[in-house]
Amino acid sequence: MQAQRLAPQEVRRALRISTVEGAVANIHISITGSVGGSVFLTGFAILLGANSFQLGLLGALPFIGQLFQFVGAYLEERSGNRRKLVLYNFLAARLIWALLLALPFLTFLGSAQLLVFFVGLAATYAFHGIATNAWMSWMSDLVPPRRRGSYFGMRNTVAAMTAMASAFLAGLALDYFRERGGEAVGYALIFGVAVLAAIIAAGLLARQAEPPMQPRPRTSIKEMVRAPMRDANFRSFSAASTGWTMVIGIAAPFFFAYGLTTLEINFATLSLMAILTSAVSLIFAPIVGRMQDKIGSRVTITVCVLGNAIVPWGWVIATPDNLLPIWIGSVITGIFWPGLHQGLSNVLMERAPMVARSSAIAAYGALTGFGTLTAGLLGGALAMALDDTQLVVGSLSIVGLGFLFVLTSLGRIVMAVVFWRTL
């Protein structure tokens, strides 16, 4: 039986609410790093005493969220109410930060501070993973197909602007307290703002209309995992993407840590570097999108992977007195990363089997998340082993974490070949 659709005016109102909700939610996301990490998340872990291996673990934790997408898909089928599933899980994920921000003051916990931090962070990723699948399903039904490109382009632009502004202001605030010996107070302030933004975003989600779900047959979690893997094209693409997450994940958790410690960059400057990347991305994302329509995903992804292979060298070459290579790398990332992100998303939509699309997306997330987990743990172990290592080649000096940046650059070149042969 066909479920009754929302009236046009209900859809328009829901889309307006979603745009505002995205802008507010991105204040929380940009500060806490609940999607993709942030300089503040890395700095907070360092404040709590995290070593190099634990920073690698920090980069591996997002795997939990990707794994829990299966749980989200399973619960979505059985609950039939995506709004409650999204609302309660997003709110739970984000309110955990009300506890985490207090950790530096709970000195009686001693070394257990880090344990509580990682457990709490793992829980946020799990709740977030459950909500993500239901949110994507909800929005796919809410946004008319002919308007998806323009609507999400506008929504993402608004969200990016609030994310850039909040990250910069948070960086300024944290630097202010850090210079005065109150770094823990600074973190409590910015994370407190993030929690407040999460509460407001939840209120907006509660008012956003949900289209009725179309009836569909129930499947077990085991079948959700197995069904998409029967498709050879999907398997090969998932394997290549998992390789890519391993290549970038082996060094990703350490760039901000290297900047804060070895290069002595303050939070405001690191935030500005990220803002520059976002600003350039806003310009180049539509250009690369049109290019992809003309020359295809294979060429676009390969070129963008090779472009991103240059970026880690900026961190290797940079010194505390010369940060220009990192600024240049921020621009290069803004040019090439959108094409890579959009390209992989498009190929996923093309290769995910129609009969098991939701399961395929969850399976893809779990596989690539496993790559991130493996890379984070391996990167952490290598970072510990290479901590006091230095290699001088002419005027170039590679120190400690710099070896991981060289490794990820070489791995990206290899992955360009893999994608060329796979896509």
Image (tube, helix red, strand yellow):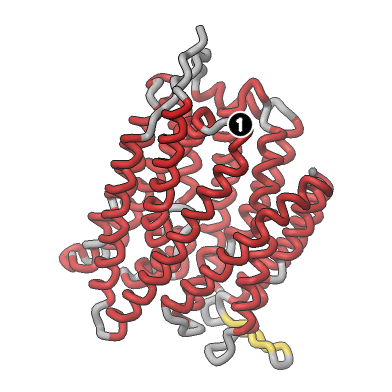
In the rendered image, residue 240, in percent from the top left (x then y), is placed at: 71, 46
Q: Pick whichever, 119 or 302, lies toward us.
A: 302
Q: What residue is drawn where x is 66% and y is 49%?
A: 342
Vertical side of 38 occupied by 127: above or below: above
Instruction: Give above or below for 64 relative to 273.
Output: above
Looking at the picture, does residue 25 appear above or below residue 2?
below
Res 395 → quadrant: bottom right
| Percent position of residue 370, x then y | 56, 46
Q: Three-letter amino acid code at disc 1?
A: Pro
Vertical side of 225 occupied by 384: above or below: below
Q: Position of residue 299 (x, y in %)?
A: 82, 52
Q: Position of residue 275 (x, y in %)?
A: 52, 68
Quadrant in which residue 98 is drawn: bottom left
Residue displayed at 52% across by 13% down: 217
Q: Nearer the viewer, residue 262 or 144?
A: 144
Q: For the point 36% across and 52% down, which residue is it?
A: 121
Q: Which residue is mark 1?
A: 145
- Which residue of the protein is positioned furthest toward the top in this rendering? 1
Residue 281: in sight, yes or no?
A: yes
Image quarter of residue 261:
bottom left
Disc 1 secondary structure class: helix
- Residue 264 vs residue 212, the one in the foreground: 212
